[in-house]
Amino acid sequence: MTHSTSTLRRRTLLGAVAALGATALPSLAQSKVALRISTPAVPDDWHGKMWTVFKESLDKSAPGEFDVQINLNGSLFKQGTEPAAMARGNLELAAISAQDIAKILPEYSIFTAGYLVRDPDHQQKVFNGPIGAEMYKAVAEKMEVQILGIGYLGSRQVNLREVRNVKTPADLKGVKLRMPGSKEWLFLGEALGATPTPLAFGEVYLGLKTGTVDGQDNPLPSVRAAKFYEVTKQIVLTSHLTDGIFIAISNKAWAAMGAAQKQKVQAATQAAIAFNNDNRIKEEAQLVDFFKKEGLQVTTPDVESFRKTVQAAYQNSEYAKVWPKGLVERINAVK
Ligand code: KDO
């Protein structure tokens, strides 16, 4: 064999290996389960960061099996359009709200009502018990998604551009209060005594800055993470909704997974929820001081007056007419 023939052979061999590599790689990538995630959460918020915990958990428990794609800031799907995207097969995972669920299952508008779920502990017990199981079953049937768990978003507070003396709902009269854009959310703003104005989460900062709206409501950790405190002067501690986000996966993606993969996705979800809840609960307790240092007035209204007015508004509303009989009492009885 001459020198040049052996070089040629080696080259051919190398070429063949490279070609093999080139075809082997995409097929390997294709066999990964793609999990596209879309959320309006900002990167600095705990329920944005929790998706990295989810991804890291899966990378560890199932190396190379999943391709987790995290899309924050509503960059893949607009806030509130995630359930439809999942049903169409364009999205695998999202954190959906009770308001999203109520659009399809009006009887579960019960969880959009102010002053019903008491606190994060009550929330976990309600949704991780029989009430949650019944709801998740109905959601799987009607919305084509599986709820894997609930994360705590926080206690929603009223956050105003200009300082105002707010003791009762009557004091919010005429206040253009930004709410997320669905009728269930708008009703909450109305029940609080304000004039609700729909706006997507990503537009709230500018809306507050320019004065399109007079205020917004969100849990304190989100007021910090989205920097709303930079463009507002007051927080009124109404604590009107113990808010939660339901981690949901499309039925299609779920059905395509084997039992072991499902178990790993479940474990990753639980790790993400624990990360979110622990950090959020801890931070929520410390933020009043932070906002005061930032120069905001943090005031306490007559919460009982808000509770009475908001609960009456819901009880007398069209929403309550379709709530499952006895469910309010069952929720209240969860200890
Ligand atoms: C909001 O738009 O005010 C809200 O808090 C509603 C929640 O359901 C959820 O969509 C949340 O925004 C986003 O995750 C951004 O934090």
Image (cartoon, grey):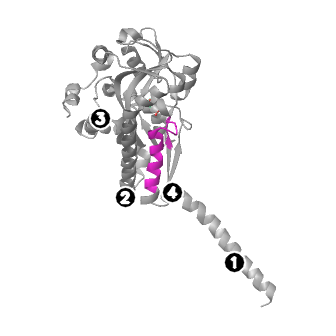
* Marker disc for residue 260: 2
Q: Is residue 212 left or right of residue 168?
A: right
Instruction: Judge whether 231 appears above or below 119 on screen.
Output: above
Q: Position of residue 130 (x, y in %)?
A: 23, 38
- Proximity of marks 3 and 4: CB atoms separated by less than 8 Å: no
Magenta stretch holds residue 7: no
Residue marked by disc 4: 32
Q: In the image, what residue type sits under mark 1? A: Leu
Magenta stretch holds residue 43: yes
Residue marked by disc 1: 13
Q: Nearer the viewer, mark 3 or mark 1?
A: 3
Label 2 Cα neighbours within 10 Å, binned few <14 / some 14-19 / many ≥20: few
Q: In the image, what residue type sits under mark 4? A: Lys
- Proximity of marks 4 and 2: CB atoms separated by less than 8 Å: no
Q: Is residue 6 left or right of residue 118?
A: right
Callout 2: SS: helix
Label 3 Cα neighbours within 10 Å, binned few <14 / some 14-19 / many ≥20: many
Give the extent of the magenta segment: 37-58
Residue drawn at x 49%, y 36% as measured from the top left: 41
Whether the residue carrying mark 1 lies under 8 Å from ligand 1 is answered with no
Q: Nearer the viewer, mark 3 or mark 4?
A: 3
Q: Position of residue 93 (x, y in %)?
A: 45, 43
Q: Nearer the viewer, mark 3 or mark 2?
A: 3
Instruction: Judge whether 8 appears above or below 259 on screen.
Output: below
Label 3 to label 4, Cα distance in Å?
35 Å
